[in-house]
Image (cartoon, coloured by chain):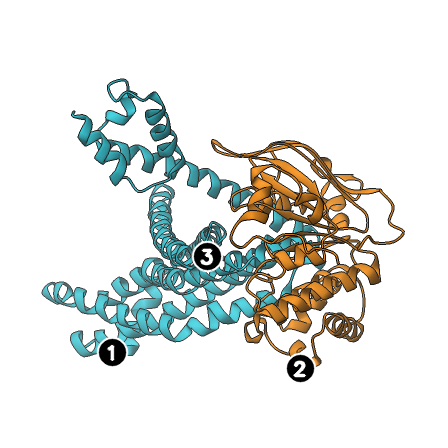
């Protein structure tokens, strides 16, 4: 590899990841290009991969310690309920729960319609029209309603959490809080956590109802299955366990959304553009992790045979 | 300009403090002492570590080595309750105010009282209004949200909040940055008045030469990780170190005003 390409590699790299700058500094200090350490001569793609891995590792460790701190703060608040801030909890339930009802309702209603429509053709082929209740019921209650709700809330509230905390750290409000002897975790994270852990299951129930209703409408229009028949079959096909499995996943999703949103908010450094970056990151990571968690639930449930 | 009756007791003692960010050395074995009742200013070019030093003094950051004692307490070995008790003994005014955008100015000022005292809400409101009046803000300003305030009013509100718990020690980060000369002059006056009234010790970071010449009792110049010079502005103006000369010889520098 020629010295020229080495230099462009160093220039093109977006500046100062700590590791990168250290390597560059050492490389410059060595003076002679031929004597540059092997690391610098690696192709940029590999270098990027390495930097990405180091970044990922650091961020994972930071996330883990944030989870630990939050858990400690939560434990302290549970041990001393007087320290709990009830008003912000109620405020959060309203903001991320009640205010999200229309959009969650609309989207799960539409998903219900789509599921019923997609299964209609197949079912009709076998004359199994009535089983549309099984398809809609199981898929909505077990998977779609909790997942759709969590994804909407990750986009809606998770972004808001990151933006709020990010802005507060840019405007020194977080520092001010610490110097006033108010723990930011207790004021900013715990109310969101408790609020969403309460609100998300309720939202999922709402999504269940509207999703099944959407499926029911489509079943009647497309398959000629009346509401009465649908509901009769629905009660037989879907057990309480299925319903609880769907709802039971949502507190975990809520925890993921809050922890990622707040974590990325606290990582905001510098100015307004950083707030935007962390907000985007929080939404992407929260959605990815929610889906990963959902997949892990599926695997666990299949092992447990429920 | 010397403040009368001041004793030489140290309020802040910084001993061999070193701080690094990665390979970048911010402080290397820095020593500093702030005495009771003085208005102490930290100056230095950007990146000289004055903000970091301030953050270390107010428990927002830890140095890599060395000790910092504030009001007699060693910051490194504080338990959580002790840290909380210490935080109630000082007030901090941030560069951008650090006021909570979701609370009115009055609630902002009352917040420390609401968090750390068992006082009635009505009383807290009265104390907050009094603190605001002390810093020159009206009741109407108190009912507004921080985003509705001008820069000068924001600094005053932030100062009022820093004073909420009647601290012994006040930290000011760039108290006059971003203010028009008139408001900045008001802040100068206010800082001196508060010190004289309450016997406060004031530690500030500033670039404002008027503030330095007229208000600061002692000034420390930070450069290359150490304190390069310390003394009153007229003492500093006679020192030869290049980092200090910058403040006096540059195009924006200012020679000491000659007594008649």
Q: Which circle's residue, 3 or 1, is located before the other in the chain?
A: 1
Q: Is residue A302 left or right of residue B33?
A: left
Mark 2 — residue? B140
- For residue A254, which numbered disc appears in the image? 3
Can you give x and y, in whole percent of width and height, for residue A262 in the image? Answer: 49, 54
- Circles 3 and 1, Cβ within 8 Å, touching? The answer is no
Callouts 1 and 2 in the same chain: no
Residue A27 found in image quarter: top left
Chain ID, cyan in image: A
In depth, the one of B100 and B200 nearer the eye is: B200
Which subunit holds the residue at mark 2? B
Mark 1 — residue? A226
Furthest residue in direction top, as rendered: A35
Can you give x and y, in whole percent of width and height, for residue A190 in the image? Answer: 57, 56
Q: Is residue A288 left or right of residue A202?
A: left
Q: Is residue A70 left or right of residue B169?
A: left
In 3D space, how far apart are the residues under numbered discs 1 and 2 (Cα atoms)?
Answer: 64 Å
Residue A187 found in image quarter: bottom right
Which subunit holds the residue at mark 1? A
């Amino acid at each position: 590899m020629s010295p020229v390409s080495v230099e462009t590699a160093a220039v093109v790299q977006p500046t100062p990841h700590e590791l990168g700058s250290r390597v560059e500094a050492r490389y410059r200090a060595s003076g002679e290009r031929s004597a540059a350490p092997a690391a610098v001569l690696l192709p940029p793609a590999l270098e990027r991969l390495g930097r990405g891995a180091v970044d990922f590792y650091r961020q994972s460790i930071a996330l883990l310690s944030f989870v630990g701190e939050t858990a400690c703060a939560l434990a302290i608040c549970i041990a001393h309920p007087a320290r709990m801030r009830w008003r912000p909890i109620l405020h959060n339930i309203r903001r991320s729960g009640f205010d999200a009802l229309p959009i969650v309702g609309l989207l799960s209603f539409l998903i219900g319609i789509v599921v019923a429509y997609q299964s209609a053709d197949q079912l009709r082929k076998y004359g199994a029209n009535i089983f549309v209740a099984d398809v809609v019921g199981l898929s909505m209650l077990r998977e779609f309603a909790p997942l759709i709700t969590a994804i909407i809330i990750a986009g809606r509230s998770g972004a808001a959490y990151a933006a709020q905390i990010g802005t507060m750290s840019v405007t020194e409000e977080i520092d001010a809080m610490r110097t006033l002897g108010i723990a930011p975790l207790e004021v900013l994270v715990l109310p969101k956590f408790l609020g969403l852990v309460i609100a998300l299951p309720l939202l999922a129930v709402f999504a269940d109802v509207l999703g099944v209703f959407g499926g029911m409408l489509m079943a009647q229009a497309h398959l000629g299955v009346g509401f009465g028949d649908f509901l009769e079959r629905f009660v037989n096909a879907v057990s309480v366990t299925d319903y609880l499995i769907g709802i039971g996943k949502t507190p975990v999703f809520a925890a993921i959304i809050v922890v990622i949103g707040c974590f990325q908010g606290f990582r905001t450094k510098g100015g307004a553009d950083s707030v935007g970056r962390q907000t985007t990151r929080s939404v992407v990571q929260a959605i990815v992790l929610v889906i990963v968690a959902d997949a892990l639930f599926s695997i666990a449930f299949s092992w447990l045979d429920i | 300009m010397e403040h009368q009756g001041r004793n030489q007791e140290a309020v802040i003692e910084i001993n061999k403090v070193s701080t690094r960010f990665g390979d970048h050395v911010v402080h290397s074995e820095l020593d500093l002492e702030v005495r009771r009742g003085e208005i102490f200013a930290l100056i230095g070019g950007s990146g000289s570590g004055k903000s970091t030093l301030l953050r270390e003094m107010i428990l927002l950051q830890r140095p890599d080595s060395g000790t910092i004692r504030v009001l007699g307490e060693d910051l490194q070995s504080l338990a959580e309750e002790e840290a909380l008790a210490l935080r109630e003994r000082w007030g901090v005014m941030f560069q951008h105010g650090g006021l909570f955008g979701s609370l009115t100015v009055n609630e902002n000022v009352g917040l420390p009282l609401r968090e750390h005292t068992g006082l009635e809400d009505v009383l807290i409101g009265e104390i907050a209004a009094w603190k605001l009046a002390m810093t020159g803000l009206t009741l109407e300003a108190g009912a507004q949200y921080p985003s509705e305030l001008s820069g000068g009013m924001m600094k005053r509100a932030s100062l009022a909040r820093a004073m909420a718990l009647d601290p012994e020690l006040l930290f000011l980060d760039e108290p006059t940055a971003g203010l028009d000369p008139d408001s900045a002059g008001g802040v100068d006056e206010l800082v001196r008045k508060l010190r004289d009234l309450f016997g406060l010790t004031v530690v500030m970071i500033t670039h404002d030469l008027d503030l330095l010449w007229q208000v600061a009792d002692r000034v420390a110049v930070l450069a290359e990780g150490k304190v390069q010079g310390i003394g009153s502005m007229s003492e500093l103006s006679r020192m030869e170190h290049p980092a200090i000369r910058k403040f006096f010889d540059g195009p924006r520098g200012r020679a000491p005003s000659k007594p008649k």
